[in-house]
Image (cartoon, rainbow, N blue to C red):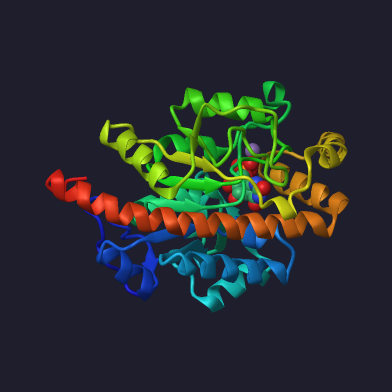
Amino acid sequence: MTEPNLHGNASGAHCSFSPAVARTLKSGGAVVALESTVIAHGLPAPHNLETALGCEEEVRGSGAEPATIGVVAGRPVIGLENEQLDAIANRKDVAKVSLSNLGQVVASRRWGATTVAATLHLAHSAGIRVFATGGIGGVHRGAAQSFDISADLAALARYPLIVVCAGAKAILDLQKTVEALETLGVPLIGYRTDELPAFYSRQSGLKLDDRADRPEDVVALALAHWQLGCTSAVVVAQPAPVEFEVPAGEIRSAIELAVDAAGLLGVTGKQVTPFLLNSVSESIGWRAVEANIALLRQNARLAGRIAISLARDGARDGARDGGDR
Ligand code: PSU
Ligand code: MN
């Protein structure tokens, strides 16, 4: 592991970098950040490790360098090596790390799997501009009472990365999630769709105002957003592959059961999302896992293509603007 000072004040000094990621960042190449909560807490073994490696292969297949992010014995790592990915996938003591406990996990030298929020923070500090995930967190059902709103939304408002996802799971209140992103000034772009995808399902019934059909269109929009001085993320929502999707009608009752069970059992805080995700996967079974894997890989592939396009256009715009971007 080397520790370069990469990008001005976003030094990444508190992180370790894999040699491949450090080299690519230094040369202005295309890098895609990947989160690790989905590996530790989102998918069952052995599919979690296989999928983590599969997503990295998808990014490489697009010509970009993957940087899976996590915390190894108290050290944030940008570009986990295969043995570290294996440990995150299989150890029983890996904390779910968001922004509120990243410092605590580092101070206590624990292992951590980073959510979208913590991955955005670390990726940004490393100078990475593109990130692929499955589903972003959002506003929970019943948030009017519980105030349960994912830190992912606050992080999306704060960090200027392109985030490729399959929308958000219908365990959330998707309409309120869309409203919250608008309030926070975060562009939400459908990728080859006019509708917000709902993770396993390609459709949510919620129309989106903006759409892109090519990686270059995403990059043009994001560069315009940032050049205007807007500093948020740009969320790109790509529907799950048709052959793997589970239509919304087939999931509705599983979600309602999961939400009711969480209420009855008094599940709160960080446990809510993993509890709901597990309950829904248990009801739907293997098809849910299969859809999850397929959409993660598809998002990694698209993020790779976007990163390649951004490295090209960003370099050209950077030269025009005197490189101060
Ligand atoms: N949604 C999914 N799968 C996941 C997550 C969300 O479909 O694995 C994970 C992501 O890491 C996301 C986190 O950042 O859950 C959000 O958790 P919370 O709602 O507690 O902020
Ligand atoms: Mn929460």
Q: Nearer the viewer, residue 82 or 72?
A: 82
Residue 95 visible from this viewpoint: no
Q: x, y (%) of residue 129?
A: 37, 51
Which quarter shows the C terminus? top left
Q: x, y (%) of residue 297?
A: 59, 60
Q: x, y (%) of residue 4?
A: 27, 67
Instruction: Name the residue furthest left.
Output: 322
Give the image quarter of residue 15: bottom left
Identity of the residue drawn at 27% across and 50% down: 314
Give the image quarter of residue 161: top left
Horizontal side of 266 relative to 314 (left or right) equals right
Relative to 160, residue 282 above or below: below
Which quarter shows the N terminus? bottom left
Identity of the residue drawn at 74% across and 64% down: 44
Relative to 156, residue 277 above or below: below
Horizontal side of 40 relative to 153 (left or right) equals right
